[in-house]
Image: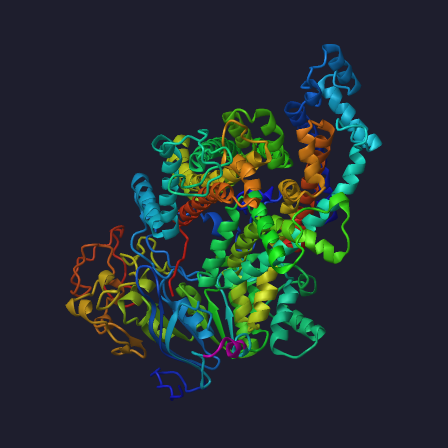
């Protein structure tokens, strides 16, 4: 097990490094940190632009820039200056916003997961029944839904519900980051969590159903029944336990993806999390902020891939020899 | 449903307690193409301690009939008839009631050992689970029993193996573990569904050995399902030959092997490579393929492939009746023909053999037979 | 990112671990055991493993050519049984007509300002008008057309590139395969939507470039699946048998590998269309996709959002409806194709 883990970690490191380089290239290609500056009216002179470039270290070659950036990051833990003004400390922003995003992601995952497993198991056991059919249709619908549109719809409905019943479902994130007590938290979390959980739920429920079906039709399930075990034990100990293995891996991998997906949700609900920082960064051509976000996202993908592999080996003894 | 089972005449076997009485068992599955009659009326008695071999090709219904006994068929299956375990009717019992029977009174061994065991649990755990399911004992006791069982079936170094996972076992050893699980609670009946089909010949012997040990240890009656006549020959007391969902010949093993009275059985036996066969003699396969059991035409299902067929064979399906001059039953309109010499030659390799005429009438062209005339074969027929 | 990605394909292996002998095999339900010769006419197989219908002469006995023809006929027939997919096909066709024929037939253009400001849906303006008096139906037509164009270009581009990439990787195996798949892994560390936003801003004025960018982000799914399929088909015994019979590489690729891989590629293509539509509209909504003066269903929603809260919901609901229509119908069609191409389906009606 240990050897397996170490091997996997060692493989991940070069990928991480290459990833940072790829990210850097993409941003260098896609964004011009002086874009805003250059498009000012009246346009700045060439020497002003050159001065700015020098100040930001942009007059070096690409590789050198990359090296500077990476070195700054690894050695000083500093993501670099932001074009959004000296007051915008990327590191500090990250520190604050990461918890905001984390809150959202965790809730969404838990809800999506629980629902997905329940629905997945039920629809598998009752394959081809009306329940299965309806659940599948609903799942399809969620998968075909433009999430941003649905989020707006939720906001509209929430306002209506609030007006009608006096509940306090928040349609936007807390202003100034003041969250209040748990009750208030719930108010803020409801809509974004539903939004974020929707697609994950639909995907995972289908996956769980497929996984469960495979298991239900397997020979060892039959043997378990033949042993005279109670139906419940057969279903849980032999069915669910084995069916959850692929599911666990899938969820772990998707976690990192959800992180990336918070971009839209945060934007619509105006949460001051990592997602909005990223979008603002693109709008202002703040390359360092954008780089920071992309780097974190990439690192998370790699880390969670690693966790998924290890988790799989823990849960399925056959993999440990690999 | 509490009727006295009508005793199936089985001559030449000493009367013993019947542990499993199957009567007119039929199993039908719905499908896109129409109802599939997988089993069309199987009846047999299984006596305490005896081994019944059920033989047939894929699709003959042999596995399905045993799954019906255990109640392991999918919900879409329509099962009719009667299966009595020691006077208790099993068909129609609820799942909960069946869990009392399965693993404890009737145990089952399946075909593919590579997939029969749950891959994420240790062998010892799966064995203990079987014990704990029906006995109120501690985990330690169950584990001891598991060790015992592993020894009986011949697993080397059981104390090390007990904590290993299925993927660390070879196919033959996994099957032996499955056998161990089956015998864990001293069942009265063990059903072995093609236990050696998925294994190499050399491993087969080990598994059959383990089966024998299981039977001896538990004193259980066994139903041994297989398509391999060789396996049956070594193990069974009585044989039931199935074709297209129905038994076509049944009785004590010697009688069937030496005096088959149904052409299908003859064909099966004739198609076996034998050590005492001369090398020039070709194997005589049965021409054609088994019928689809979706829309069976009237008459004997074997008729299209049978060299003895006549009009009556295509019109009415023969009943299982005591065969002339033999100690067992056969379902064939012409079983008496087979009582004559030359029975084993009805499947001549000459595809133009005229049906209906006796085996001696057709030009017995056996290509490959050398100029030296072969001596008469076992049944006394002239070559 | 999962917000707008297709049903997370279970064929995505986590990291580099091959989930080969997972309980029952994960591929079964989603893409079917494509390796089998789908020539058996009857599909009822009991879970006990016994093939209840020992039918007549196996279709695989016949010559290659005849068997391939029957395969597609069978697929078509099965597809026709999937009612939802058929209906979706019709609806999608209607949407296409609406988007491409509509602007030709409808007398308003999307930028024709009339005097009917913010009018609710009526006979004159079936979808209502916006605050400039522009007919909304014309706008939705234009938006649907552009979104469809982008979606299909993306899907075709991503499918073609991904399939070729995956096929090459799977066919050559060994070091080539390893390297190519590492590259895919690398690619996957970067969230598609995010990079789409980043690059979309730069290229947004040109929808073709935008489509290219999106295709460049979404091809990895196809690559992985096709590679998996090619790898597994390569190992099948009938390939060995074909070689033993003297089949050339070309014949093997065209007669055996491609037909078996075509199925998943087609299914993936449909899924990609859905993904592309959802991704593009999301980006356009955020302002990083299609830019003014081009109209996308996503950009319509941007302007429709404020309208919705202001009581002029028609500017919000119609574009959303059409996005849903496109994605939903395409998903159902994809599902129908999936079922039709999977020869191990056991739809036993009790």
Q: Quadrant of residue C12?
A: top right
- Where C48 falls versus A139 (above or below)? below
Q: Position of residue B79 (x, y in %)?
A: 38, 73
Q: How is the image coloured?
A: rainbow
Q: Left or right: where does residue A74 sit relative to residue B369?
A: right
| Res. B383 visible in picture | no
Question: Split into 4 quadrants, where in the image is the C terminus of chain B?
Answer: bottom left
Q: Nearer the viewer, residue C307 or A39?
A: C307
Q: Left or right: where does residue A307 sit relative to residue C350?
A: right
Q: Quadrant of residue B87?
A: bottom left
Question: Split into 4 quadrants, where in the image is the N terminus of chain B?
Answer: bottom left
- Where A209 falls versus B309 (above or below)? above
Q: Position of residue C297 (x, y in %)?
A: 50, 37
- Where A20 falls versus B284 (above or below)? above
Q: Position of residue B265 (x, y in %)?
A: 31, 67
Q: Which residues are magenta?
A: B93-99
**Residue at 73% across / 55% down in the picture?**
A184
Q: Nearer the viewer, residue B350 or A70?
A: A70
Residue B251 painted magenta: no
Q: Quadrant of residue B30?
A: bottom left
Q: Nearer the viewer, residue B313 or C19?
A: C19
Outermost right residue: A76
Q: Main secondary structure of the magenta part?
A: helix
């Amino acid at each position: 097990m240990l050897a397996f883990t170490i091997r996997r970690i060692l493989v991940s490191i070069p990928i991480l490094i290459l990833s940072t380089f790829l990210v850097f290239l993409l941003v260098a290609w896609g964004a011009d940190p002086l874009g805003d500056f250059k498009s000012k009216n009246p346009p700045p002179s060439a020497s002003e632009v050159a001065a700015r470039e020098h100040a930001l270290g942009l007059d070096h070659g690409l590789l050198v820039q990359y090296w500077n950036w990476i070195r700054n990051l690894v050695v000083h833990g500093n993501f670099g200056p932001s074009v959004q003004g000296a007051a915008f400390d990327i590191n500090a922003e990250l520190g604050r916003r990461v918890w905001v995003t984390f809150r959202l992601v965790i809730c969404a995952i838990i809800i999506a997961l629980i629902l997905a497993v329940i629905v997945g198991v039920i629809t598998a056991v009752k394959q081809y029944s009306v329940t299965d059919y309806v659940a599948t249709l609903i799942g399809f619908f969620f998968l075909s839904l433009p999430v941003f549109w649905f989020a707006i719809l939720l906001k509209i409905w929430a306002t209506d519900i609030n007006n009608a019943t006096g509940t306090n479902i928040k349609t936007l994130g807390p202003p100034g980051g003041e969250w209040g007590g748990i009750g208030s938290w719930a108010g803020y979390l409801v809509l974004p969590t539903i939004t974020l959980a929707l697609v994950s739920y639909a995907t995972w429920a289908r996956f769980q159903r497929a996984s469960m079906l495979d298991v239900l039709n397997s020979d060892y399930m039959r043997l378990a029944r033949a042993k005279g075990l109670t139906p419940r034990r057969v279903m849980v100990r032999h069915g669910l336990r084995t069916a959850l293995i692929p599911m666990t891996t899938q969820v772990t991998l998707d976690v990192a993806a959800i992180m990336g997906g918070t971009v839209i949700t945060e934007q619509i609900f105006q949460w001051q999390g990592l997602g909005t920082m990223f979008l603002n960064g693109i709008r202002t051509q703040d390359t360092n902020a954008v780089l920071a976000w992309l780097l974190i996202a990439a690192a998370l993908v790699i880390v969670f891939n690693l966790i998924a592999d290890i988790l799989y080996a823990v849960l399925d003894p056959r993999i440990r020899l690999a | 449903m509490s009727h006295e089972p009508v005793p199936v005449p089985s001559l030449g076997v000493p009367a013993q307690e019947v542990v499993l009485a199957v009567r007119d068992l039929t199993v039908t599955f719905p499908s896109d193409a129409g109802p599939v009659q997988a089993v069309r009326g199987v009846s047999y008695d299984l006596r305490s301690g005896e081994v019944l071999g059920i033989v047939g090709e894929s699709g003959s219904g042999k596995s399905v009939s045993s799954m019906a006994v255990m109640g392991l068929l999918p919900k879409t299956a329509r099962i009719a008839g009667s299966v009595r375990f020691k006077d208790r009717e099993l068909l129609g019992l609820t799942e909960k009631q069946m869990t009392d029977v399965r693993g404890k009174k009737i145990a089952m061994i399946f075909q593919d050992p590579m997939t029969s065991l749950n891959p994420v649990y240790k062998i010892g755990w799966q064995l203990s689970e079987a014990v704990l399911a029906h006995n109120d004992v501690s985990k330690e006791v169950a584990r001891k029993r598991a060790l015992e069982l592993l020894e009986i079936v011949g697993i080397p170094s059981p104390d090390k193996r007990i904590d290993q996972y299925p993927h660390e076992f070879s196919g033959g050893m996994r099957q032996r573990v499955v056998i161990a699980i089956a015998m864990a609670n001293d069942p009265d009946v063990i059903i072995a569904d093609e236990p050696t089909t998925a294994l190499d010949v050399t491993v087969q012997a080990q598994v059959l050995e383990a089966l024998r040990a299981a039977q001896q240890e538990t004193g259980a009656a066994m139903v041994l399902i297989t398509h391999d006549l060789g396996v049956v020959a070594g193990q069974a007391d009585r044989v039931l030959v199935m074709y297209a969902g129905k038994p076509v010949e049944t009785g004590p093993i010697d009688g069937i092997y030496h005096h088959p009275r149904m052409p299908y059985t003859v064909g099966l036996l004739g198609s076996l490579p034998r050590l005492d066969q001369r090398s020039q003699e070709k194997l005589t396969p049965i021409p054609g393929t088994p019928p689809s059991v979706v829309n069976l035409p009237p008459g004997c299902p074997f008729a299209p492939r049978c060299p003895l067929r006549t009009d009556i064979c295509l019109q009415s399906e023969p009943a299982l009746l005591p065969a002339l001059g033999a100690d067992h039953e056969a379902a064939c309109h012409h079983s008496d023909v087979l009582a004559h010499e030359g029975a084993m030659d009805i499947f001549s390799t000459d595809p133009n053999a005229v049906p209906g005429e006796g085996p001696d009438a057709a030009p017995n062209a056996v290509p490959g037979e050398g100029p030296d005339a072969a001596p008469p074969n076992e049944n006394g027929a002239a070559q | 990112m999962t917000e707008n990605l297709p049903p997370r394909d279970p064929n995505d292996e986590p990291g580099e671990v091959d989930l080969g002998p997972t309980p029952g095999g994960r591929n079964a339900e989603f893409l079917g055991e494509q390796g089998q010769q789908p020539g058996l006419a009857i599909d009822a197989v009991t879970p006990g493993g016994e093939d209840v219908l020992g039918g007549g002469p196996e279709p695989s006995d016949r010559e290659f050519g005849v068997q391939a023809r029957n395969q597609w006929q069978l697929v078509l027939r099965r597809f026709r049984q999937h009612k939802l997919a058929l209906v979706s096909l019709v609806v999608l066709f209607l949407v296409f007509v609406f988007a491409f024929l509509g602007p030709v037939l409808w007398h308003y253009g999307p930028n024709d300002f009339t005097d009917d400001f913010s009018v609710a849906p009526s006979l004159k303006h079936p979808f209502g008008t916006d605050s400039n008096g522009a007919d909304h139906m014309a706008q939705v037509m234009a938006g649907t057309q552009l979104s469809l164009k982008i979606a299909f270009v993306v899907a075709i581009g991503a499918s073609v590139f991904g399939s070729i990439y995956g096929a090459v990787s799977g066919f050559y195996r060994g070091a080539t395969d390893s390297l190519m798949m590492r590259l895919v892994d690398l690619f996957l560390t970067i969230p598609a939507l995010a990079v789409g936003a980043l690059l979309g801003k730069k290229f947004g004025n040109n929808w073709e470039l935008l489509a290219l960018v999106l295709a460049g982000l979404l091809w990895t799914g196809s690559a992985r699946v096709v590679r998996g399929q090619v790898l597994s088909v390569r190992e099948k015994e009938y390939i060995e048998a074909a070689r033993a019979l003297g089949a050339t590489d070309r014949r093997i690729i065209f007669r055996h590998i491609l037909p078996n891989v075509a199925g998943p590629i087609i299914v993936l293509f449909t899924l990609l269309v859905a993904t592309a539509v959802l991704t593009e509209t999301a980006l356009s909504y955020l302002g990083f996709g299609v830019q003014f003066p081009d109209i996308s269903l996503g950009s319509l929603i941007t302007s429709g959002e404020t309208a919705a809260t202001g009581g002029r919901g028609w500017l919000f609901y119609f574009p959303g409806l059409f996005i849903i229509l496109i994605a939903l119908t395409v998903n159902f069609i994809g599902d129908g194709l999936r079922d039709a191409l999977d020869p191990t389906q056991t739809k036993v009606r009790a």
